[in-house]
Image: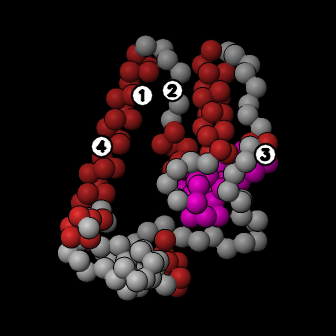
Amino acid sequence: GALLASLGGAIDTTKPFMFHPQNPLPNSLILSATEIATAKASVASFNSTIASEATKHKFALVDINTLLNRATTVGVNEGGLTFNTAFLTGGLFSYDGVHPNARAHGLIANEFIRSINRSFGANLPFVDLATLPASPIRPPSAPQTKLTDLPQLGIRLIDGASYR
């Protein structure tokens, strides 16, 4: 009730929320370009501070932001598997598209191991990602689903922003 009222009552609850053109995400739930820029600037500032402190105190630095950006742009190859951030088919996130799956956690653990090994001359073994359960990984020939594909799937993007 309260959520519906806060959205102005403009949604058609007989249609699947967010998956039908008559029941899209309302503007109040979508970040504006300004909000996205602010969030990106904040992340960059936090990461810069973390890197400075890690260097100052001779800590191993694990840069998960760079790892996820690489997964978004070119994909990440690890243990014979290729991962990217494509919705449902990228192999990194659960079906809600937000939370990392077991293989993503293994990939993150491997980044920690890589950094520890490099920084301290350790020889910790890497996690074998193929042994971890995950959402299905897209076969090389399968098309990727991106947010820009959502209109063809019957999902209308309200703010007109471009997504990848």
Q: Amino acid at mark 3?
A: Ala
Quarter residue 1 falls in: bottom left
Left or right: 54 with respect to 118? left
Q: Amino acid at mark 2?
A: Leu
Q: Is residue 118 above or below residue 131?
A: above
Between the residue at mark 2 and the residue at mark 1, the CA separation in whole angstroms equals 7 Å
- Look at discs 4 and 3 and give the one toward the viewer: 3
Q: Earlier in the sequence, mark 2 or mark 4?
A: 4
Give the residue pinned by disc 3. 130
State the extent of the magenta-drawn residues as a range: 71-95
CB atoms of marks 4 and 1 within 8 Å:
no
Between the residue at mark 1 and the residue at mark 3, the CA separation in whole angstroms equals 31 Å
Q: Amino acid at mark 1?
A: Ala
Q: Is residue 147 above or below residue 121?
A: below
Decide whether residue 59 is among the magenta residues.
no
Farthest residue, direction front: 1
CB atoms of marks 2 and 1 within 8 Å:
yes
Residue 118, position as x, y percentages in the image: 64, 22
Quarter residue 53 falls in: top left
Q: Amino acid at mark 4?
A: Ser
Give the residue pinned by disc 2. 61
Residue 42, position as x, y percentages in the image: 30, 43
The dot on residue 51 is 1
Rate crowding at label 2 as few (under 14), some (14 to 19) or many (20 or more) other CA atoms within 10 Å: some
